[in-house]
Amino acid sequence: MHAKAKHQLQGEIREISCRDEYCRMTIAAPAICHVAAAGQFVMVKPAADKSNDPLFRRPFSLHQVVDGLLTIIFKIVGRGTRNLAKMQAGEVLDVVGPLGKGFQLSSEPRHYLVGGGMGIAPLHLLAESINRQNPQSEIIALLGARTARELDAFADLQDLRFLRVELATDDGTAGHHGLVIDLLERAVAAGGRGAVYSCGPWPMMKAVALYCRAKQLPCQVSLETVMACGVGACLGCAVSGADVAGDGYLHVCKDGPVFEAGKIWL
């Protein structure tokens, strides 16, 4: 669990760059950065004087937090992200965060970070957080995507000297020709027990969770889902929980986005 403090502020865009349909945006938000933790997210939209189209903010995981600047990476998939991609440095965003419950850093000496597609985005901050807590930890990032081009947006993970990065692509254009779960199985067989953290498509996370259950490895998953409010008011991001009292549902924005794999039905 992390600090419940959240802030709504006007954040100035310091940098934005887009390549193909992927964009990287750095926002000045010192108050959010001060309390942010790996796995949490922010809700973002252009400031009201810029546009109210679309009306609702969009959720983005925290990719990096440095010196009062937070970085998000997003894919242009609709009107909201298309509008954000058209913005320029110096323009202002309406930002709320940090939101949700982030990753719990394990005391295990080895950590496997498994990401697929846009689910790779929060792993940079996670890797830095683990290394900051215990510089002696062995940290291995196992990253999967359909093509090598889809991995380009996350090339900065390769710059972390303490991090070992292995790649898998569906078409074989980078790294292992196959699924990222193959990399996890191979890495655990070679390196041994460790904590597993996963974010990406649901089928990938289900495969990771089932593997970890069979091997009795601690596993956390960070869920990606559509959400409108980010604070549990709209109830639009409900997922089925395992052994949950009441209606049996948990809400990704409030109870997550990070869950112990055994606490939800994937």
Image (cartoon, helix red, strand yellow):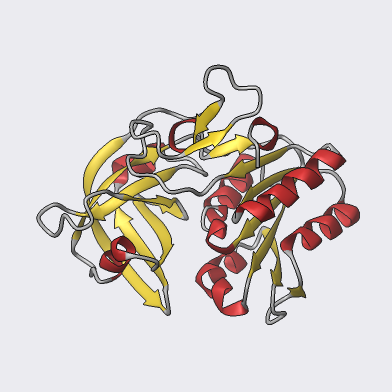
In the picture as drawn, the residue positioned furthest to the left comes out as: 49
Please tell me in which quadrant of the rendered image residue 176 appears. bottom right
| 45 relative to 73 in the view: left or right | left
| 218 relative to 252 in the view: left or right | right
Determine if residue 137 is in view: no
Q: Residue at x 48, y 48 (%)?
A: 225
Please tell me in which quadrant of the rendered image residue 132 appears. top right
Residue 129, compared with residue 260, is above or below; it is below
- Position in image of residue 166 (x %, y %): 72, 66
In the picture as drawn, the residue positioned furthest to the right comes out as: 189
Which one is nearer the viewer's eye here, 218 or 108? 218
Q: How many marks?
A: 0
Which one is nearer the viewer's eye here, 251 or 110? 251
- Position in image of residue 110 (x %, y %): 76, 46
Q: Residue at x 41, y 58 (%)?
A: 72
The quadrant of the picture occupied by the C terminus is: top right
Residue 25, compared with residue 227, is above or below; it is below
- Position in image of residue 112 (x %, y %): 72, 51
- Position in image of residue 27 (x %, y %): 31, 56
| 229 relative to 205 in the view: left or right | left
Q: Residue at x 65, y 37 (%)?
A: 265
Residue 218, compared with residue 114, is above or below; it is above
Q: Residue at x 84, y 56 (%)?
A: 185
